[in-house]
Amino acid sequence: MDLSLTPEQKQIKDMVADFVDEEVVPVASDIDHDDEFPWDIVEELADLGLMGMPFPEEYGGAGLDYHSYPIALEEISRGSGGLGTIVAAHISLAGNMVYEFGNEAQKEEYLTPLAEGEDIGAFALSEPQAGSDVPAMGTTAEKDGDGYLINGNKLWISNGSVANTVTLFAKTDPDAGNKGISSFIVRPEEDDGFIVEGTEDKLGDKGCPTAELRFDDLWIPEDRRLGEEGRGFVHALKTLNGGRITIAARSVGIAQAALDAALEYSQDREQFDQPISDFQAIQHKLADMDTKTRAARLLMHDAADKKIRGENFIKEAAQAKLYASEISREVANEGIQIHGGYGYTKDFPAERFYRDAKLNEIYEGTSEVLRNTIAQNLLN
């Protein structure tokens, strides 16, 4: 694998980095404080073609490869962890479900406005009693005429309260275990019975609404089912495998932001008549932070490379997400330590990086589940 960026990849990185520095970083603390969906910034991302990065141009996307997309998402997450989640959930989960498993008519009708940023997407899989244990879900989709009647509820749904298109998982055969789960397209503004119960007040990841959804006799036509009945569990696993590469990108972006802030602060802050960056203890922290961030970035691109080549990348994606998520928390923690007491206040962004980083170890596969995945792939 060539580790150097192509001219196109470097151009994308520079373009997104400039946008983030000019438009996102100055308002990142406001996004965190207000915890409101940043419509204006998302619209600007759409104008730049960043809301459909990996999708073909024929569906309104930018046609970027799976190196360029994580590179861009890393930069977006460097500016705001919440914005990184908004984009990742929209593209890697909701949009990718329609792209990978939708038919041509579904792609034209639902993927194109997602890729162009006219619509916002959400991925509704988790439930109060069914997080890592997906087959334990209770949401059902019963055949009703030429459609389905959906009842149940979902929890932890990123973008769930603002989405125009929701890819939903429900049981069409409650007795068939994971083979009884199917996936569907739901349109909240069109479908009666779609209810937003509320959004979570989270530790971090502010700006991205995490919603609890309820479906009360929600009827959708059969042509909104993605693929065949009973394939939803497979759809979810395949989608999450790709999504883990982008959560690795979010993790790397947050780690890089924490490192950049700590590096700058250590050179400005003086103690004992010298910058604290002159002290070996601080230098060692910075060295470890940079090494971990670089290693995580390489794991991310290794998984992306296998995906691009059409090879099995399940283990590599799990490793990238596992390592990047854990080092993002570690790097953010050291960033607070380097800032000292100031790092524990909201006067500096160090504490925000820590709060945003922690989520990476939980969503789209907890660290514990990912270790199981890696071990199973090794043993098999």
Image (cartoon, rainbow, N blue to C red):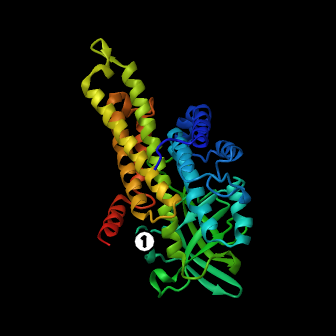
Q: Position of residue 371 (x, y in %)?
A: 32, 62
Q: Nearer the viewer, residue 141 or 79?
A: 79
> Is any atom of residue 95 visible in this view?
yes
Neighbour tally class for label 1: few under 14, some 14-19, many 20 plus, Cα within 10 Å:
few
Q: Nearer the viewer, residue 326 or 291?
A: 291
> Is any atom of residue 204 visible in this view?
no
Q: Is residue 239 toward the left or the right of residue 45 in the image?
A: left
Q: Which amino acid, by three-letter code, is at mark 1?
A: Gln
Q: Residue at x 40, y 32 (%)?
A: 345
Which image quarter: residue 147?
bottom right
Does residue 290 lie above or below 295 as drawn?
A: above
Q: Residue at x 48, y 48 (%)?
A: 249
Q: Secondary structure at mark 1?
A: loop
Q: Position of residue 277 (x, y in %)?
A: 33, 22
Q: Nearer the viewer, residue 182 or 158?
A: 182
Q: Residue at x 35, y 34 (%)?
A: 336
Q: Position of residue 265 (x, y in %)?
A: 40, 24
Report the quarter where the C terminus lies. bottom left
Does residue 34 lie above or below 261 as drawn?
A: below
Does residue 1 lie above or below 196 as drawn?
A: above
The residue at the far left in this view is: 281
The residue indicated by pointer 1 is 129
Q: Position of residue 291 (x, y in %)?
A: 34, 38
